[in-house]
Image: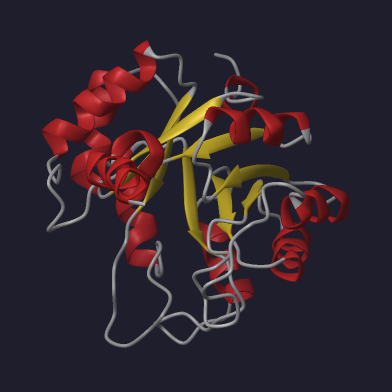
Amino acid sequence: MQPVLDQIYKGLIVSCQALEGEPLHSSFIMGRMAVAAKEGGAVGIRANSVSDILEIKKQVKLPVIGIIKQVYGEQPVFITPTMKEIDALMETGADIIATDATARIRPDGSTLEQFFKKIKEKYPHVLLMADVSSVEEAIYADNLGFDIIAPTLYGYTEDTRGLKIDHNEYKVIKEMIKQVKNAKVIAEGNVSTPEIARSLVESNVHAVVVGGAITRPQQITKRFVDALQK
């Protein structure tokens, strides 16, 4: 079988996610969304929750980046935050597991380094993706040994809230590509058009993740409505 990282190289990964309260929240619907993404040429799927991942893996034979969004009280880290979520994702057969890899302390009180070591001790061969919010965090995750790094949380942490990646300059991603020595850098976050996705691939990222621009019709509709009302 072709190695997973080779399978996704220079391709489009579609994030098929719908949280509780969203119109498409359903494992069945996310499974069909994954089929539609595959038919459109996607090389991988990013998915949230055990039930969604299991359904998606039934429907398509594409690499799946698995996450579990789990909130623990007031803790800000919620993307695959503890070993409980890692264990659950390993049971699904997810090809890659993504986790919050910011500098913030995790709900169980552990640092990212401690968490990473726990995962690798238990699952030495798992492919791990670091969702970071800064170049500094990307460098740190690379030094720890993460296989993939993405600026998924840029604009969503306390230090970066409200910021958006400048898609004209790609400064954050370009700097990550320059500074990260071992891991693959994947573009994720605010990729709203095919032109942006193409430009990111040309900037030498390993792959591009697109979510809401494809899989959240309420957001897509709002963009059209906002444009009409200007």
Quadrant showing the N terminus: top right
**Relative side of 76 to 70, left or right:** right
Measured along the vertical axis of the image, is residue 227 above or below residue 107? above
> Of 170 and 177, which appears nearest the observer?
170
Q: Residue 174's spot in the image, x, y percent? A: 80, 49
Residue lying furthest front: 230
Q: Residue 28's spot in the image, x, y percent? A: 12, 32
**Relative side of 198 to 181, left or right:** left
Residue in the picture at 46% in, 80% down: 106
Residue in the picture at 24% in, 39% down: 217
Residue in the picture at 23% in, 48% down: 18
Measured along the vertical axis of the image, is residue 163 above or below residue 186? below
> Of 44 and 224, which appears nearest the observer?
224
Measured along the vertical axis of the image, is residue 214 above or below residue 109? above
Q: Residue 11's spot in the image, x, y percent? A: 59, 23
> Of 93 and 216, which appears nearest the observer?
216
**Relative side of 69 to 103, left or right:** left
